[in-house]
Image (cartoon, grey):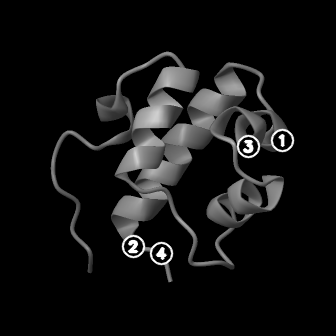
Amino acid sequence: MKSKIDLYVIQKVKEKRLEMNLSQADLAHELGMSVGFIGKVESAQYPSHYNIKHLNLLARILQCSPQDFLPKKPLQEK
């Protein structure tokens, strides 16, 4: 099960991906990962999520700061 912070980050990455008109396949190609990985990350059914290295690469690809994917304040997990 994904944590609230994972879900927040995933949603922010997805929003930025869609703003730039990139498909999951486009993003996977840019990251050097499988399309399946991006699909699993964006799906609530799988535990896959982005790590810090991914966020740095995503920020480069999506032309933003890694901070753009994180909340301003800590999230409550419960």
- On the image, the x and y values in percent for residue 26 come to 80, 33
* Residue tagged 2: 3
Q: Distance between the residues labelled 3 and 4?
A: 20 Å
Which residue type carries mark 2?
Ser
Asked whether the beta carbons under mark 3 and mark 4 sit within 8 Å of each other, the answer is no
Q: Distance between the residues labelled 4 and 2?
A: 4 Å
Mark number, residue 25: 1
Which residue type carries mark 1?
Ala
Q: Distance between the residues labelled 2 and 1?
A: 25 Å
Tell us which disc is closer to us: 4 or 1: 1
- On the image, the x and y values in percent for residue 78 come to 26, 80
Mark number, residue 28: 3
Residue 21 found in image quarter: top right
Tell us which disc is closer to us: 2 or 1: 1
Say left or right for 39 vs 56. right
Point out the tag, 4 or 1, that comes first from the N-terminus: 4
Asked whether the beta carbons under mark 1 and mark 3 sit within 8 Å of each other, the answer is yes
Tell us which disc is closer to us: 2 or 3: 3
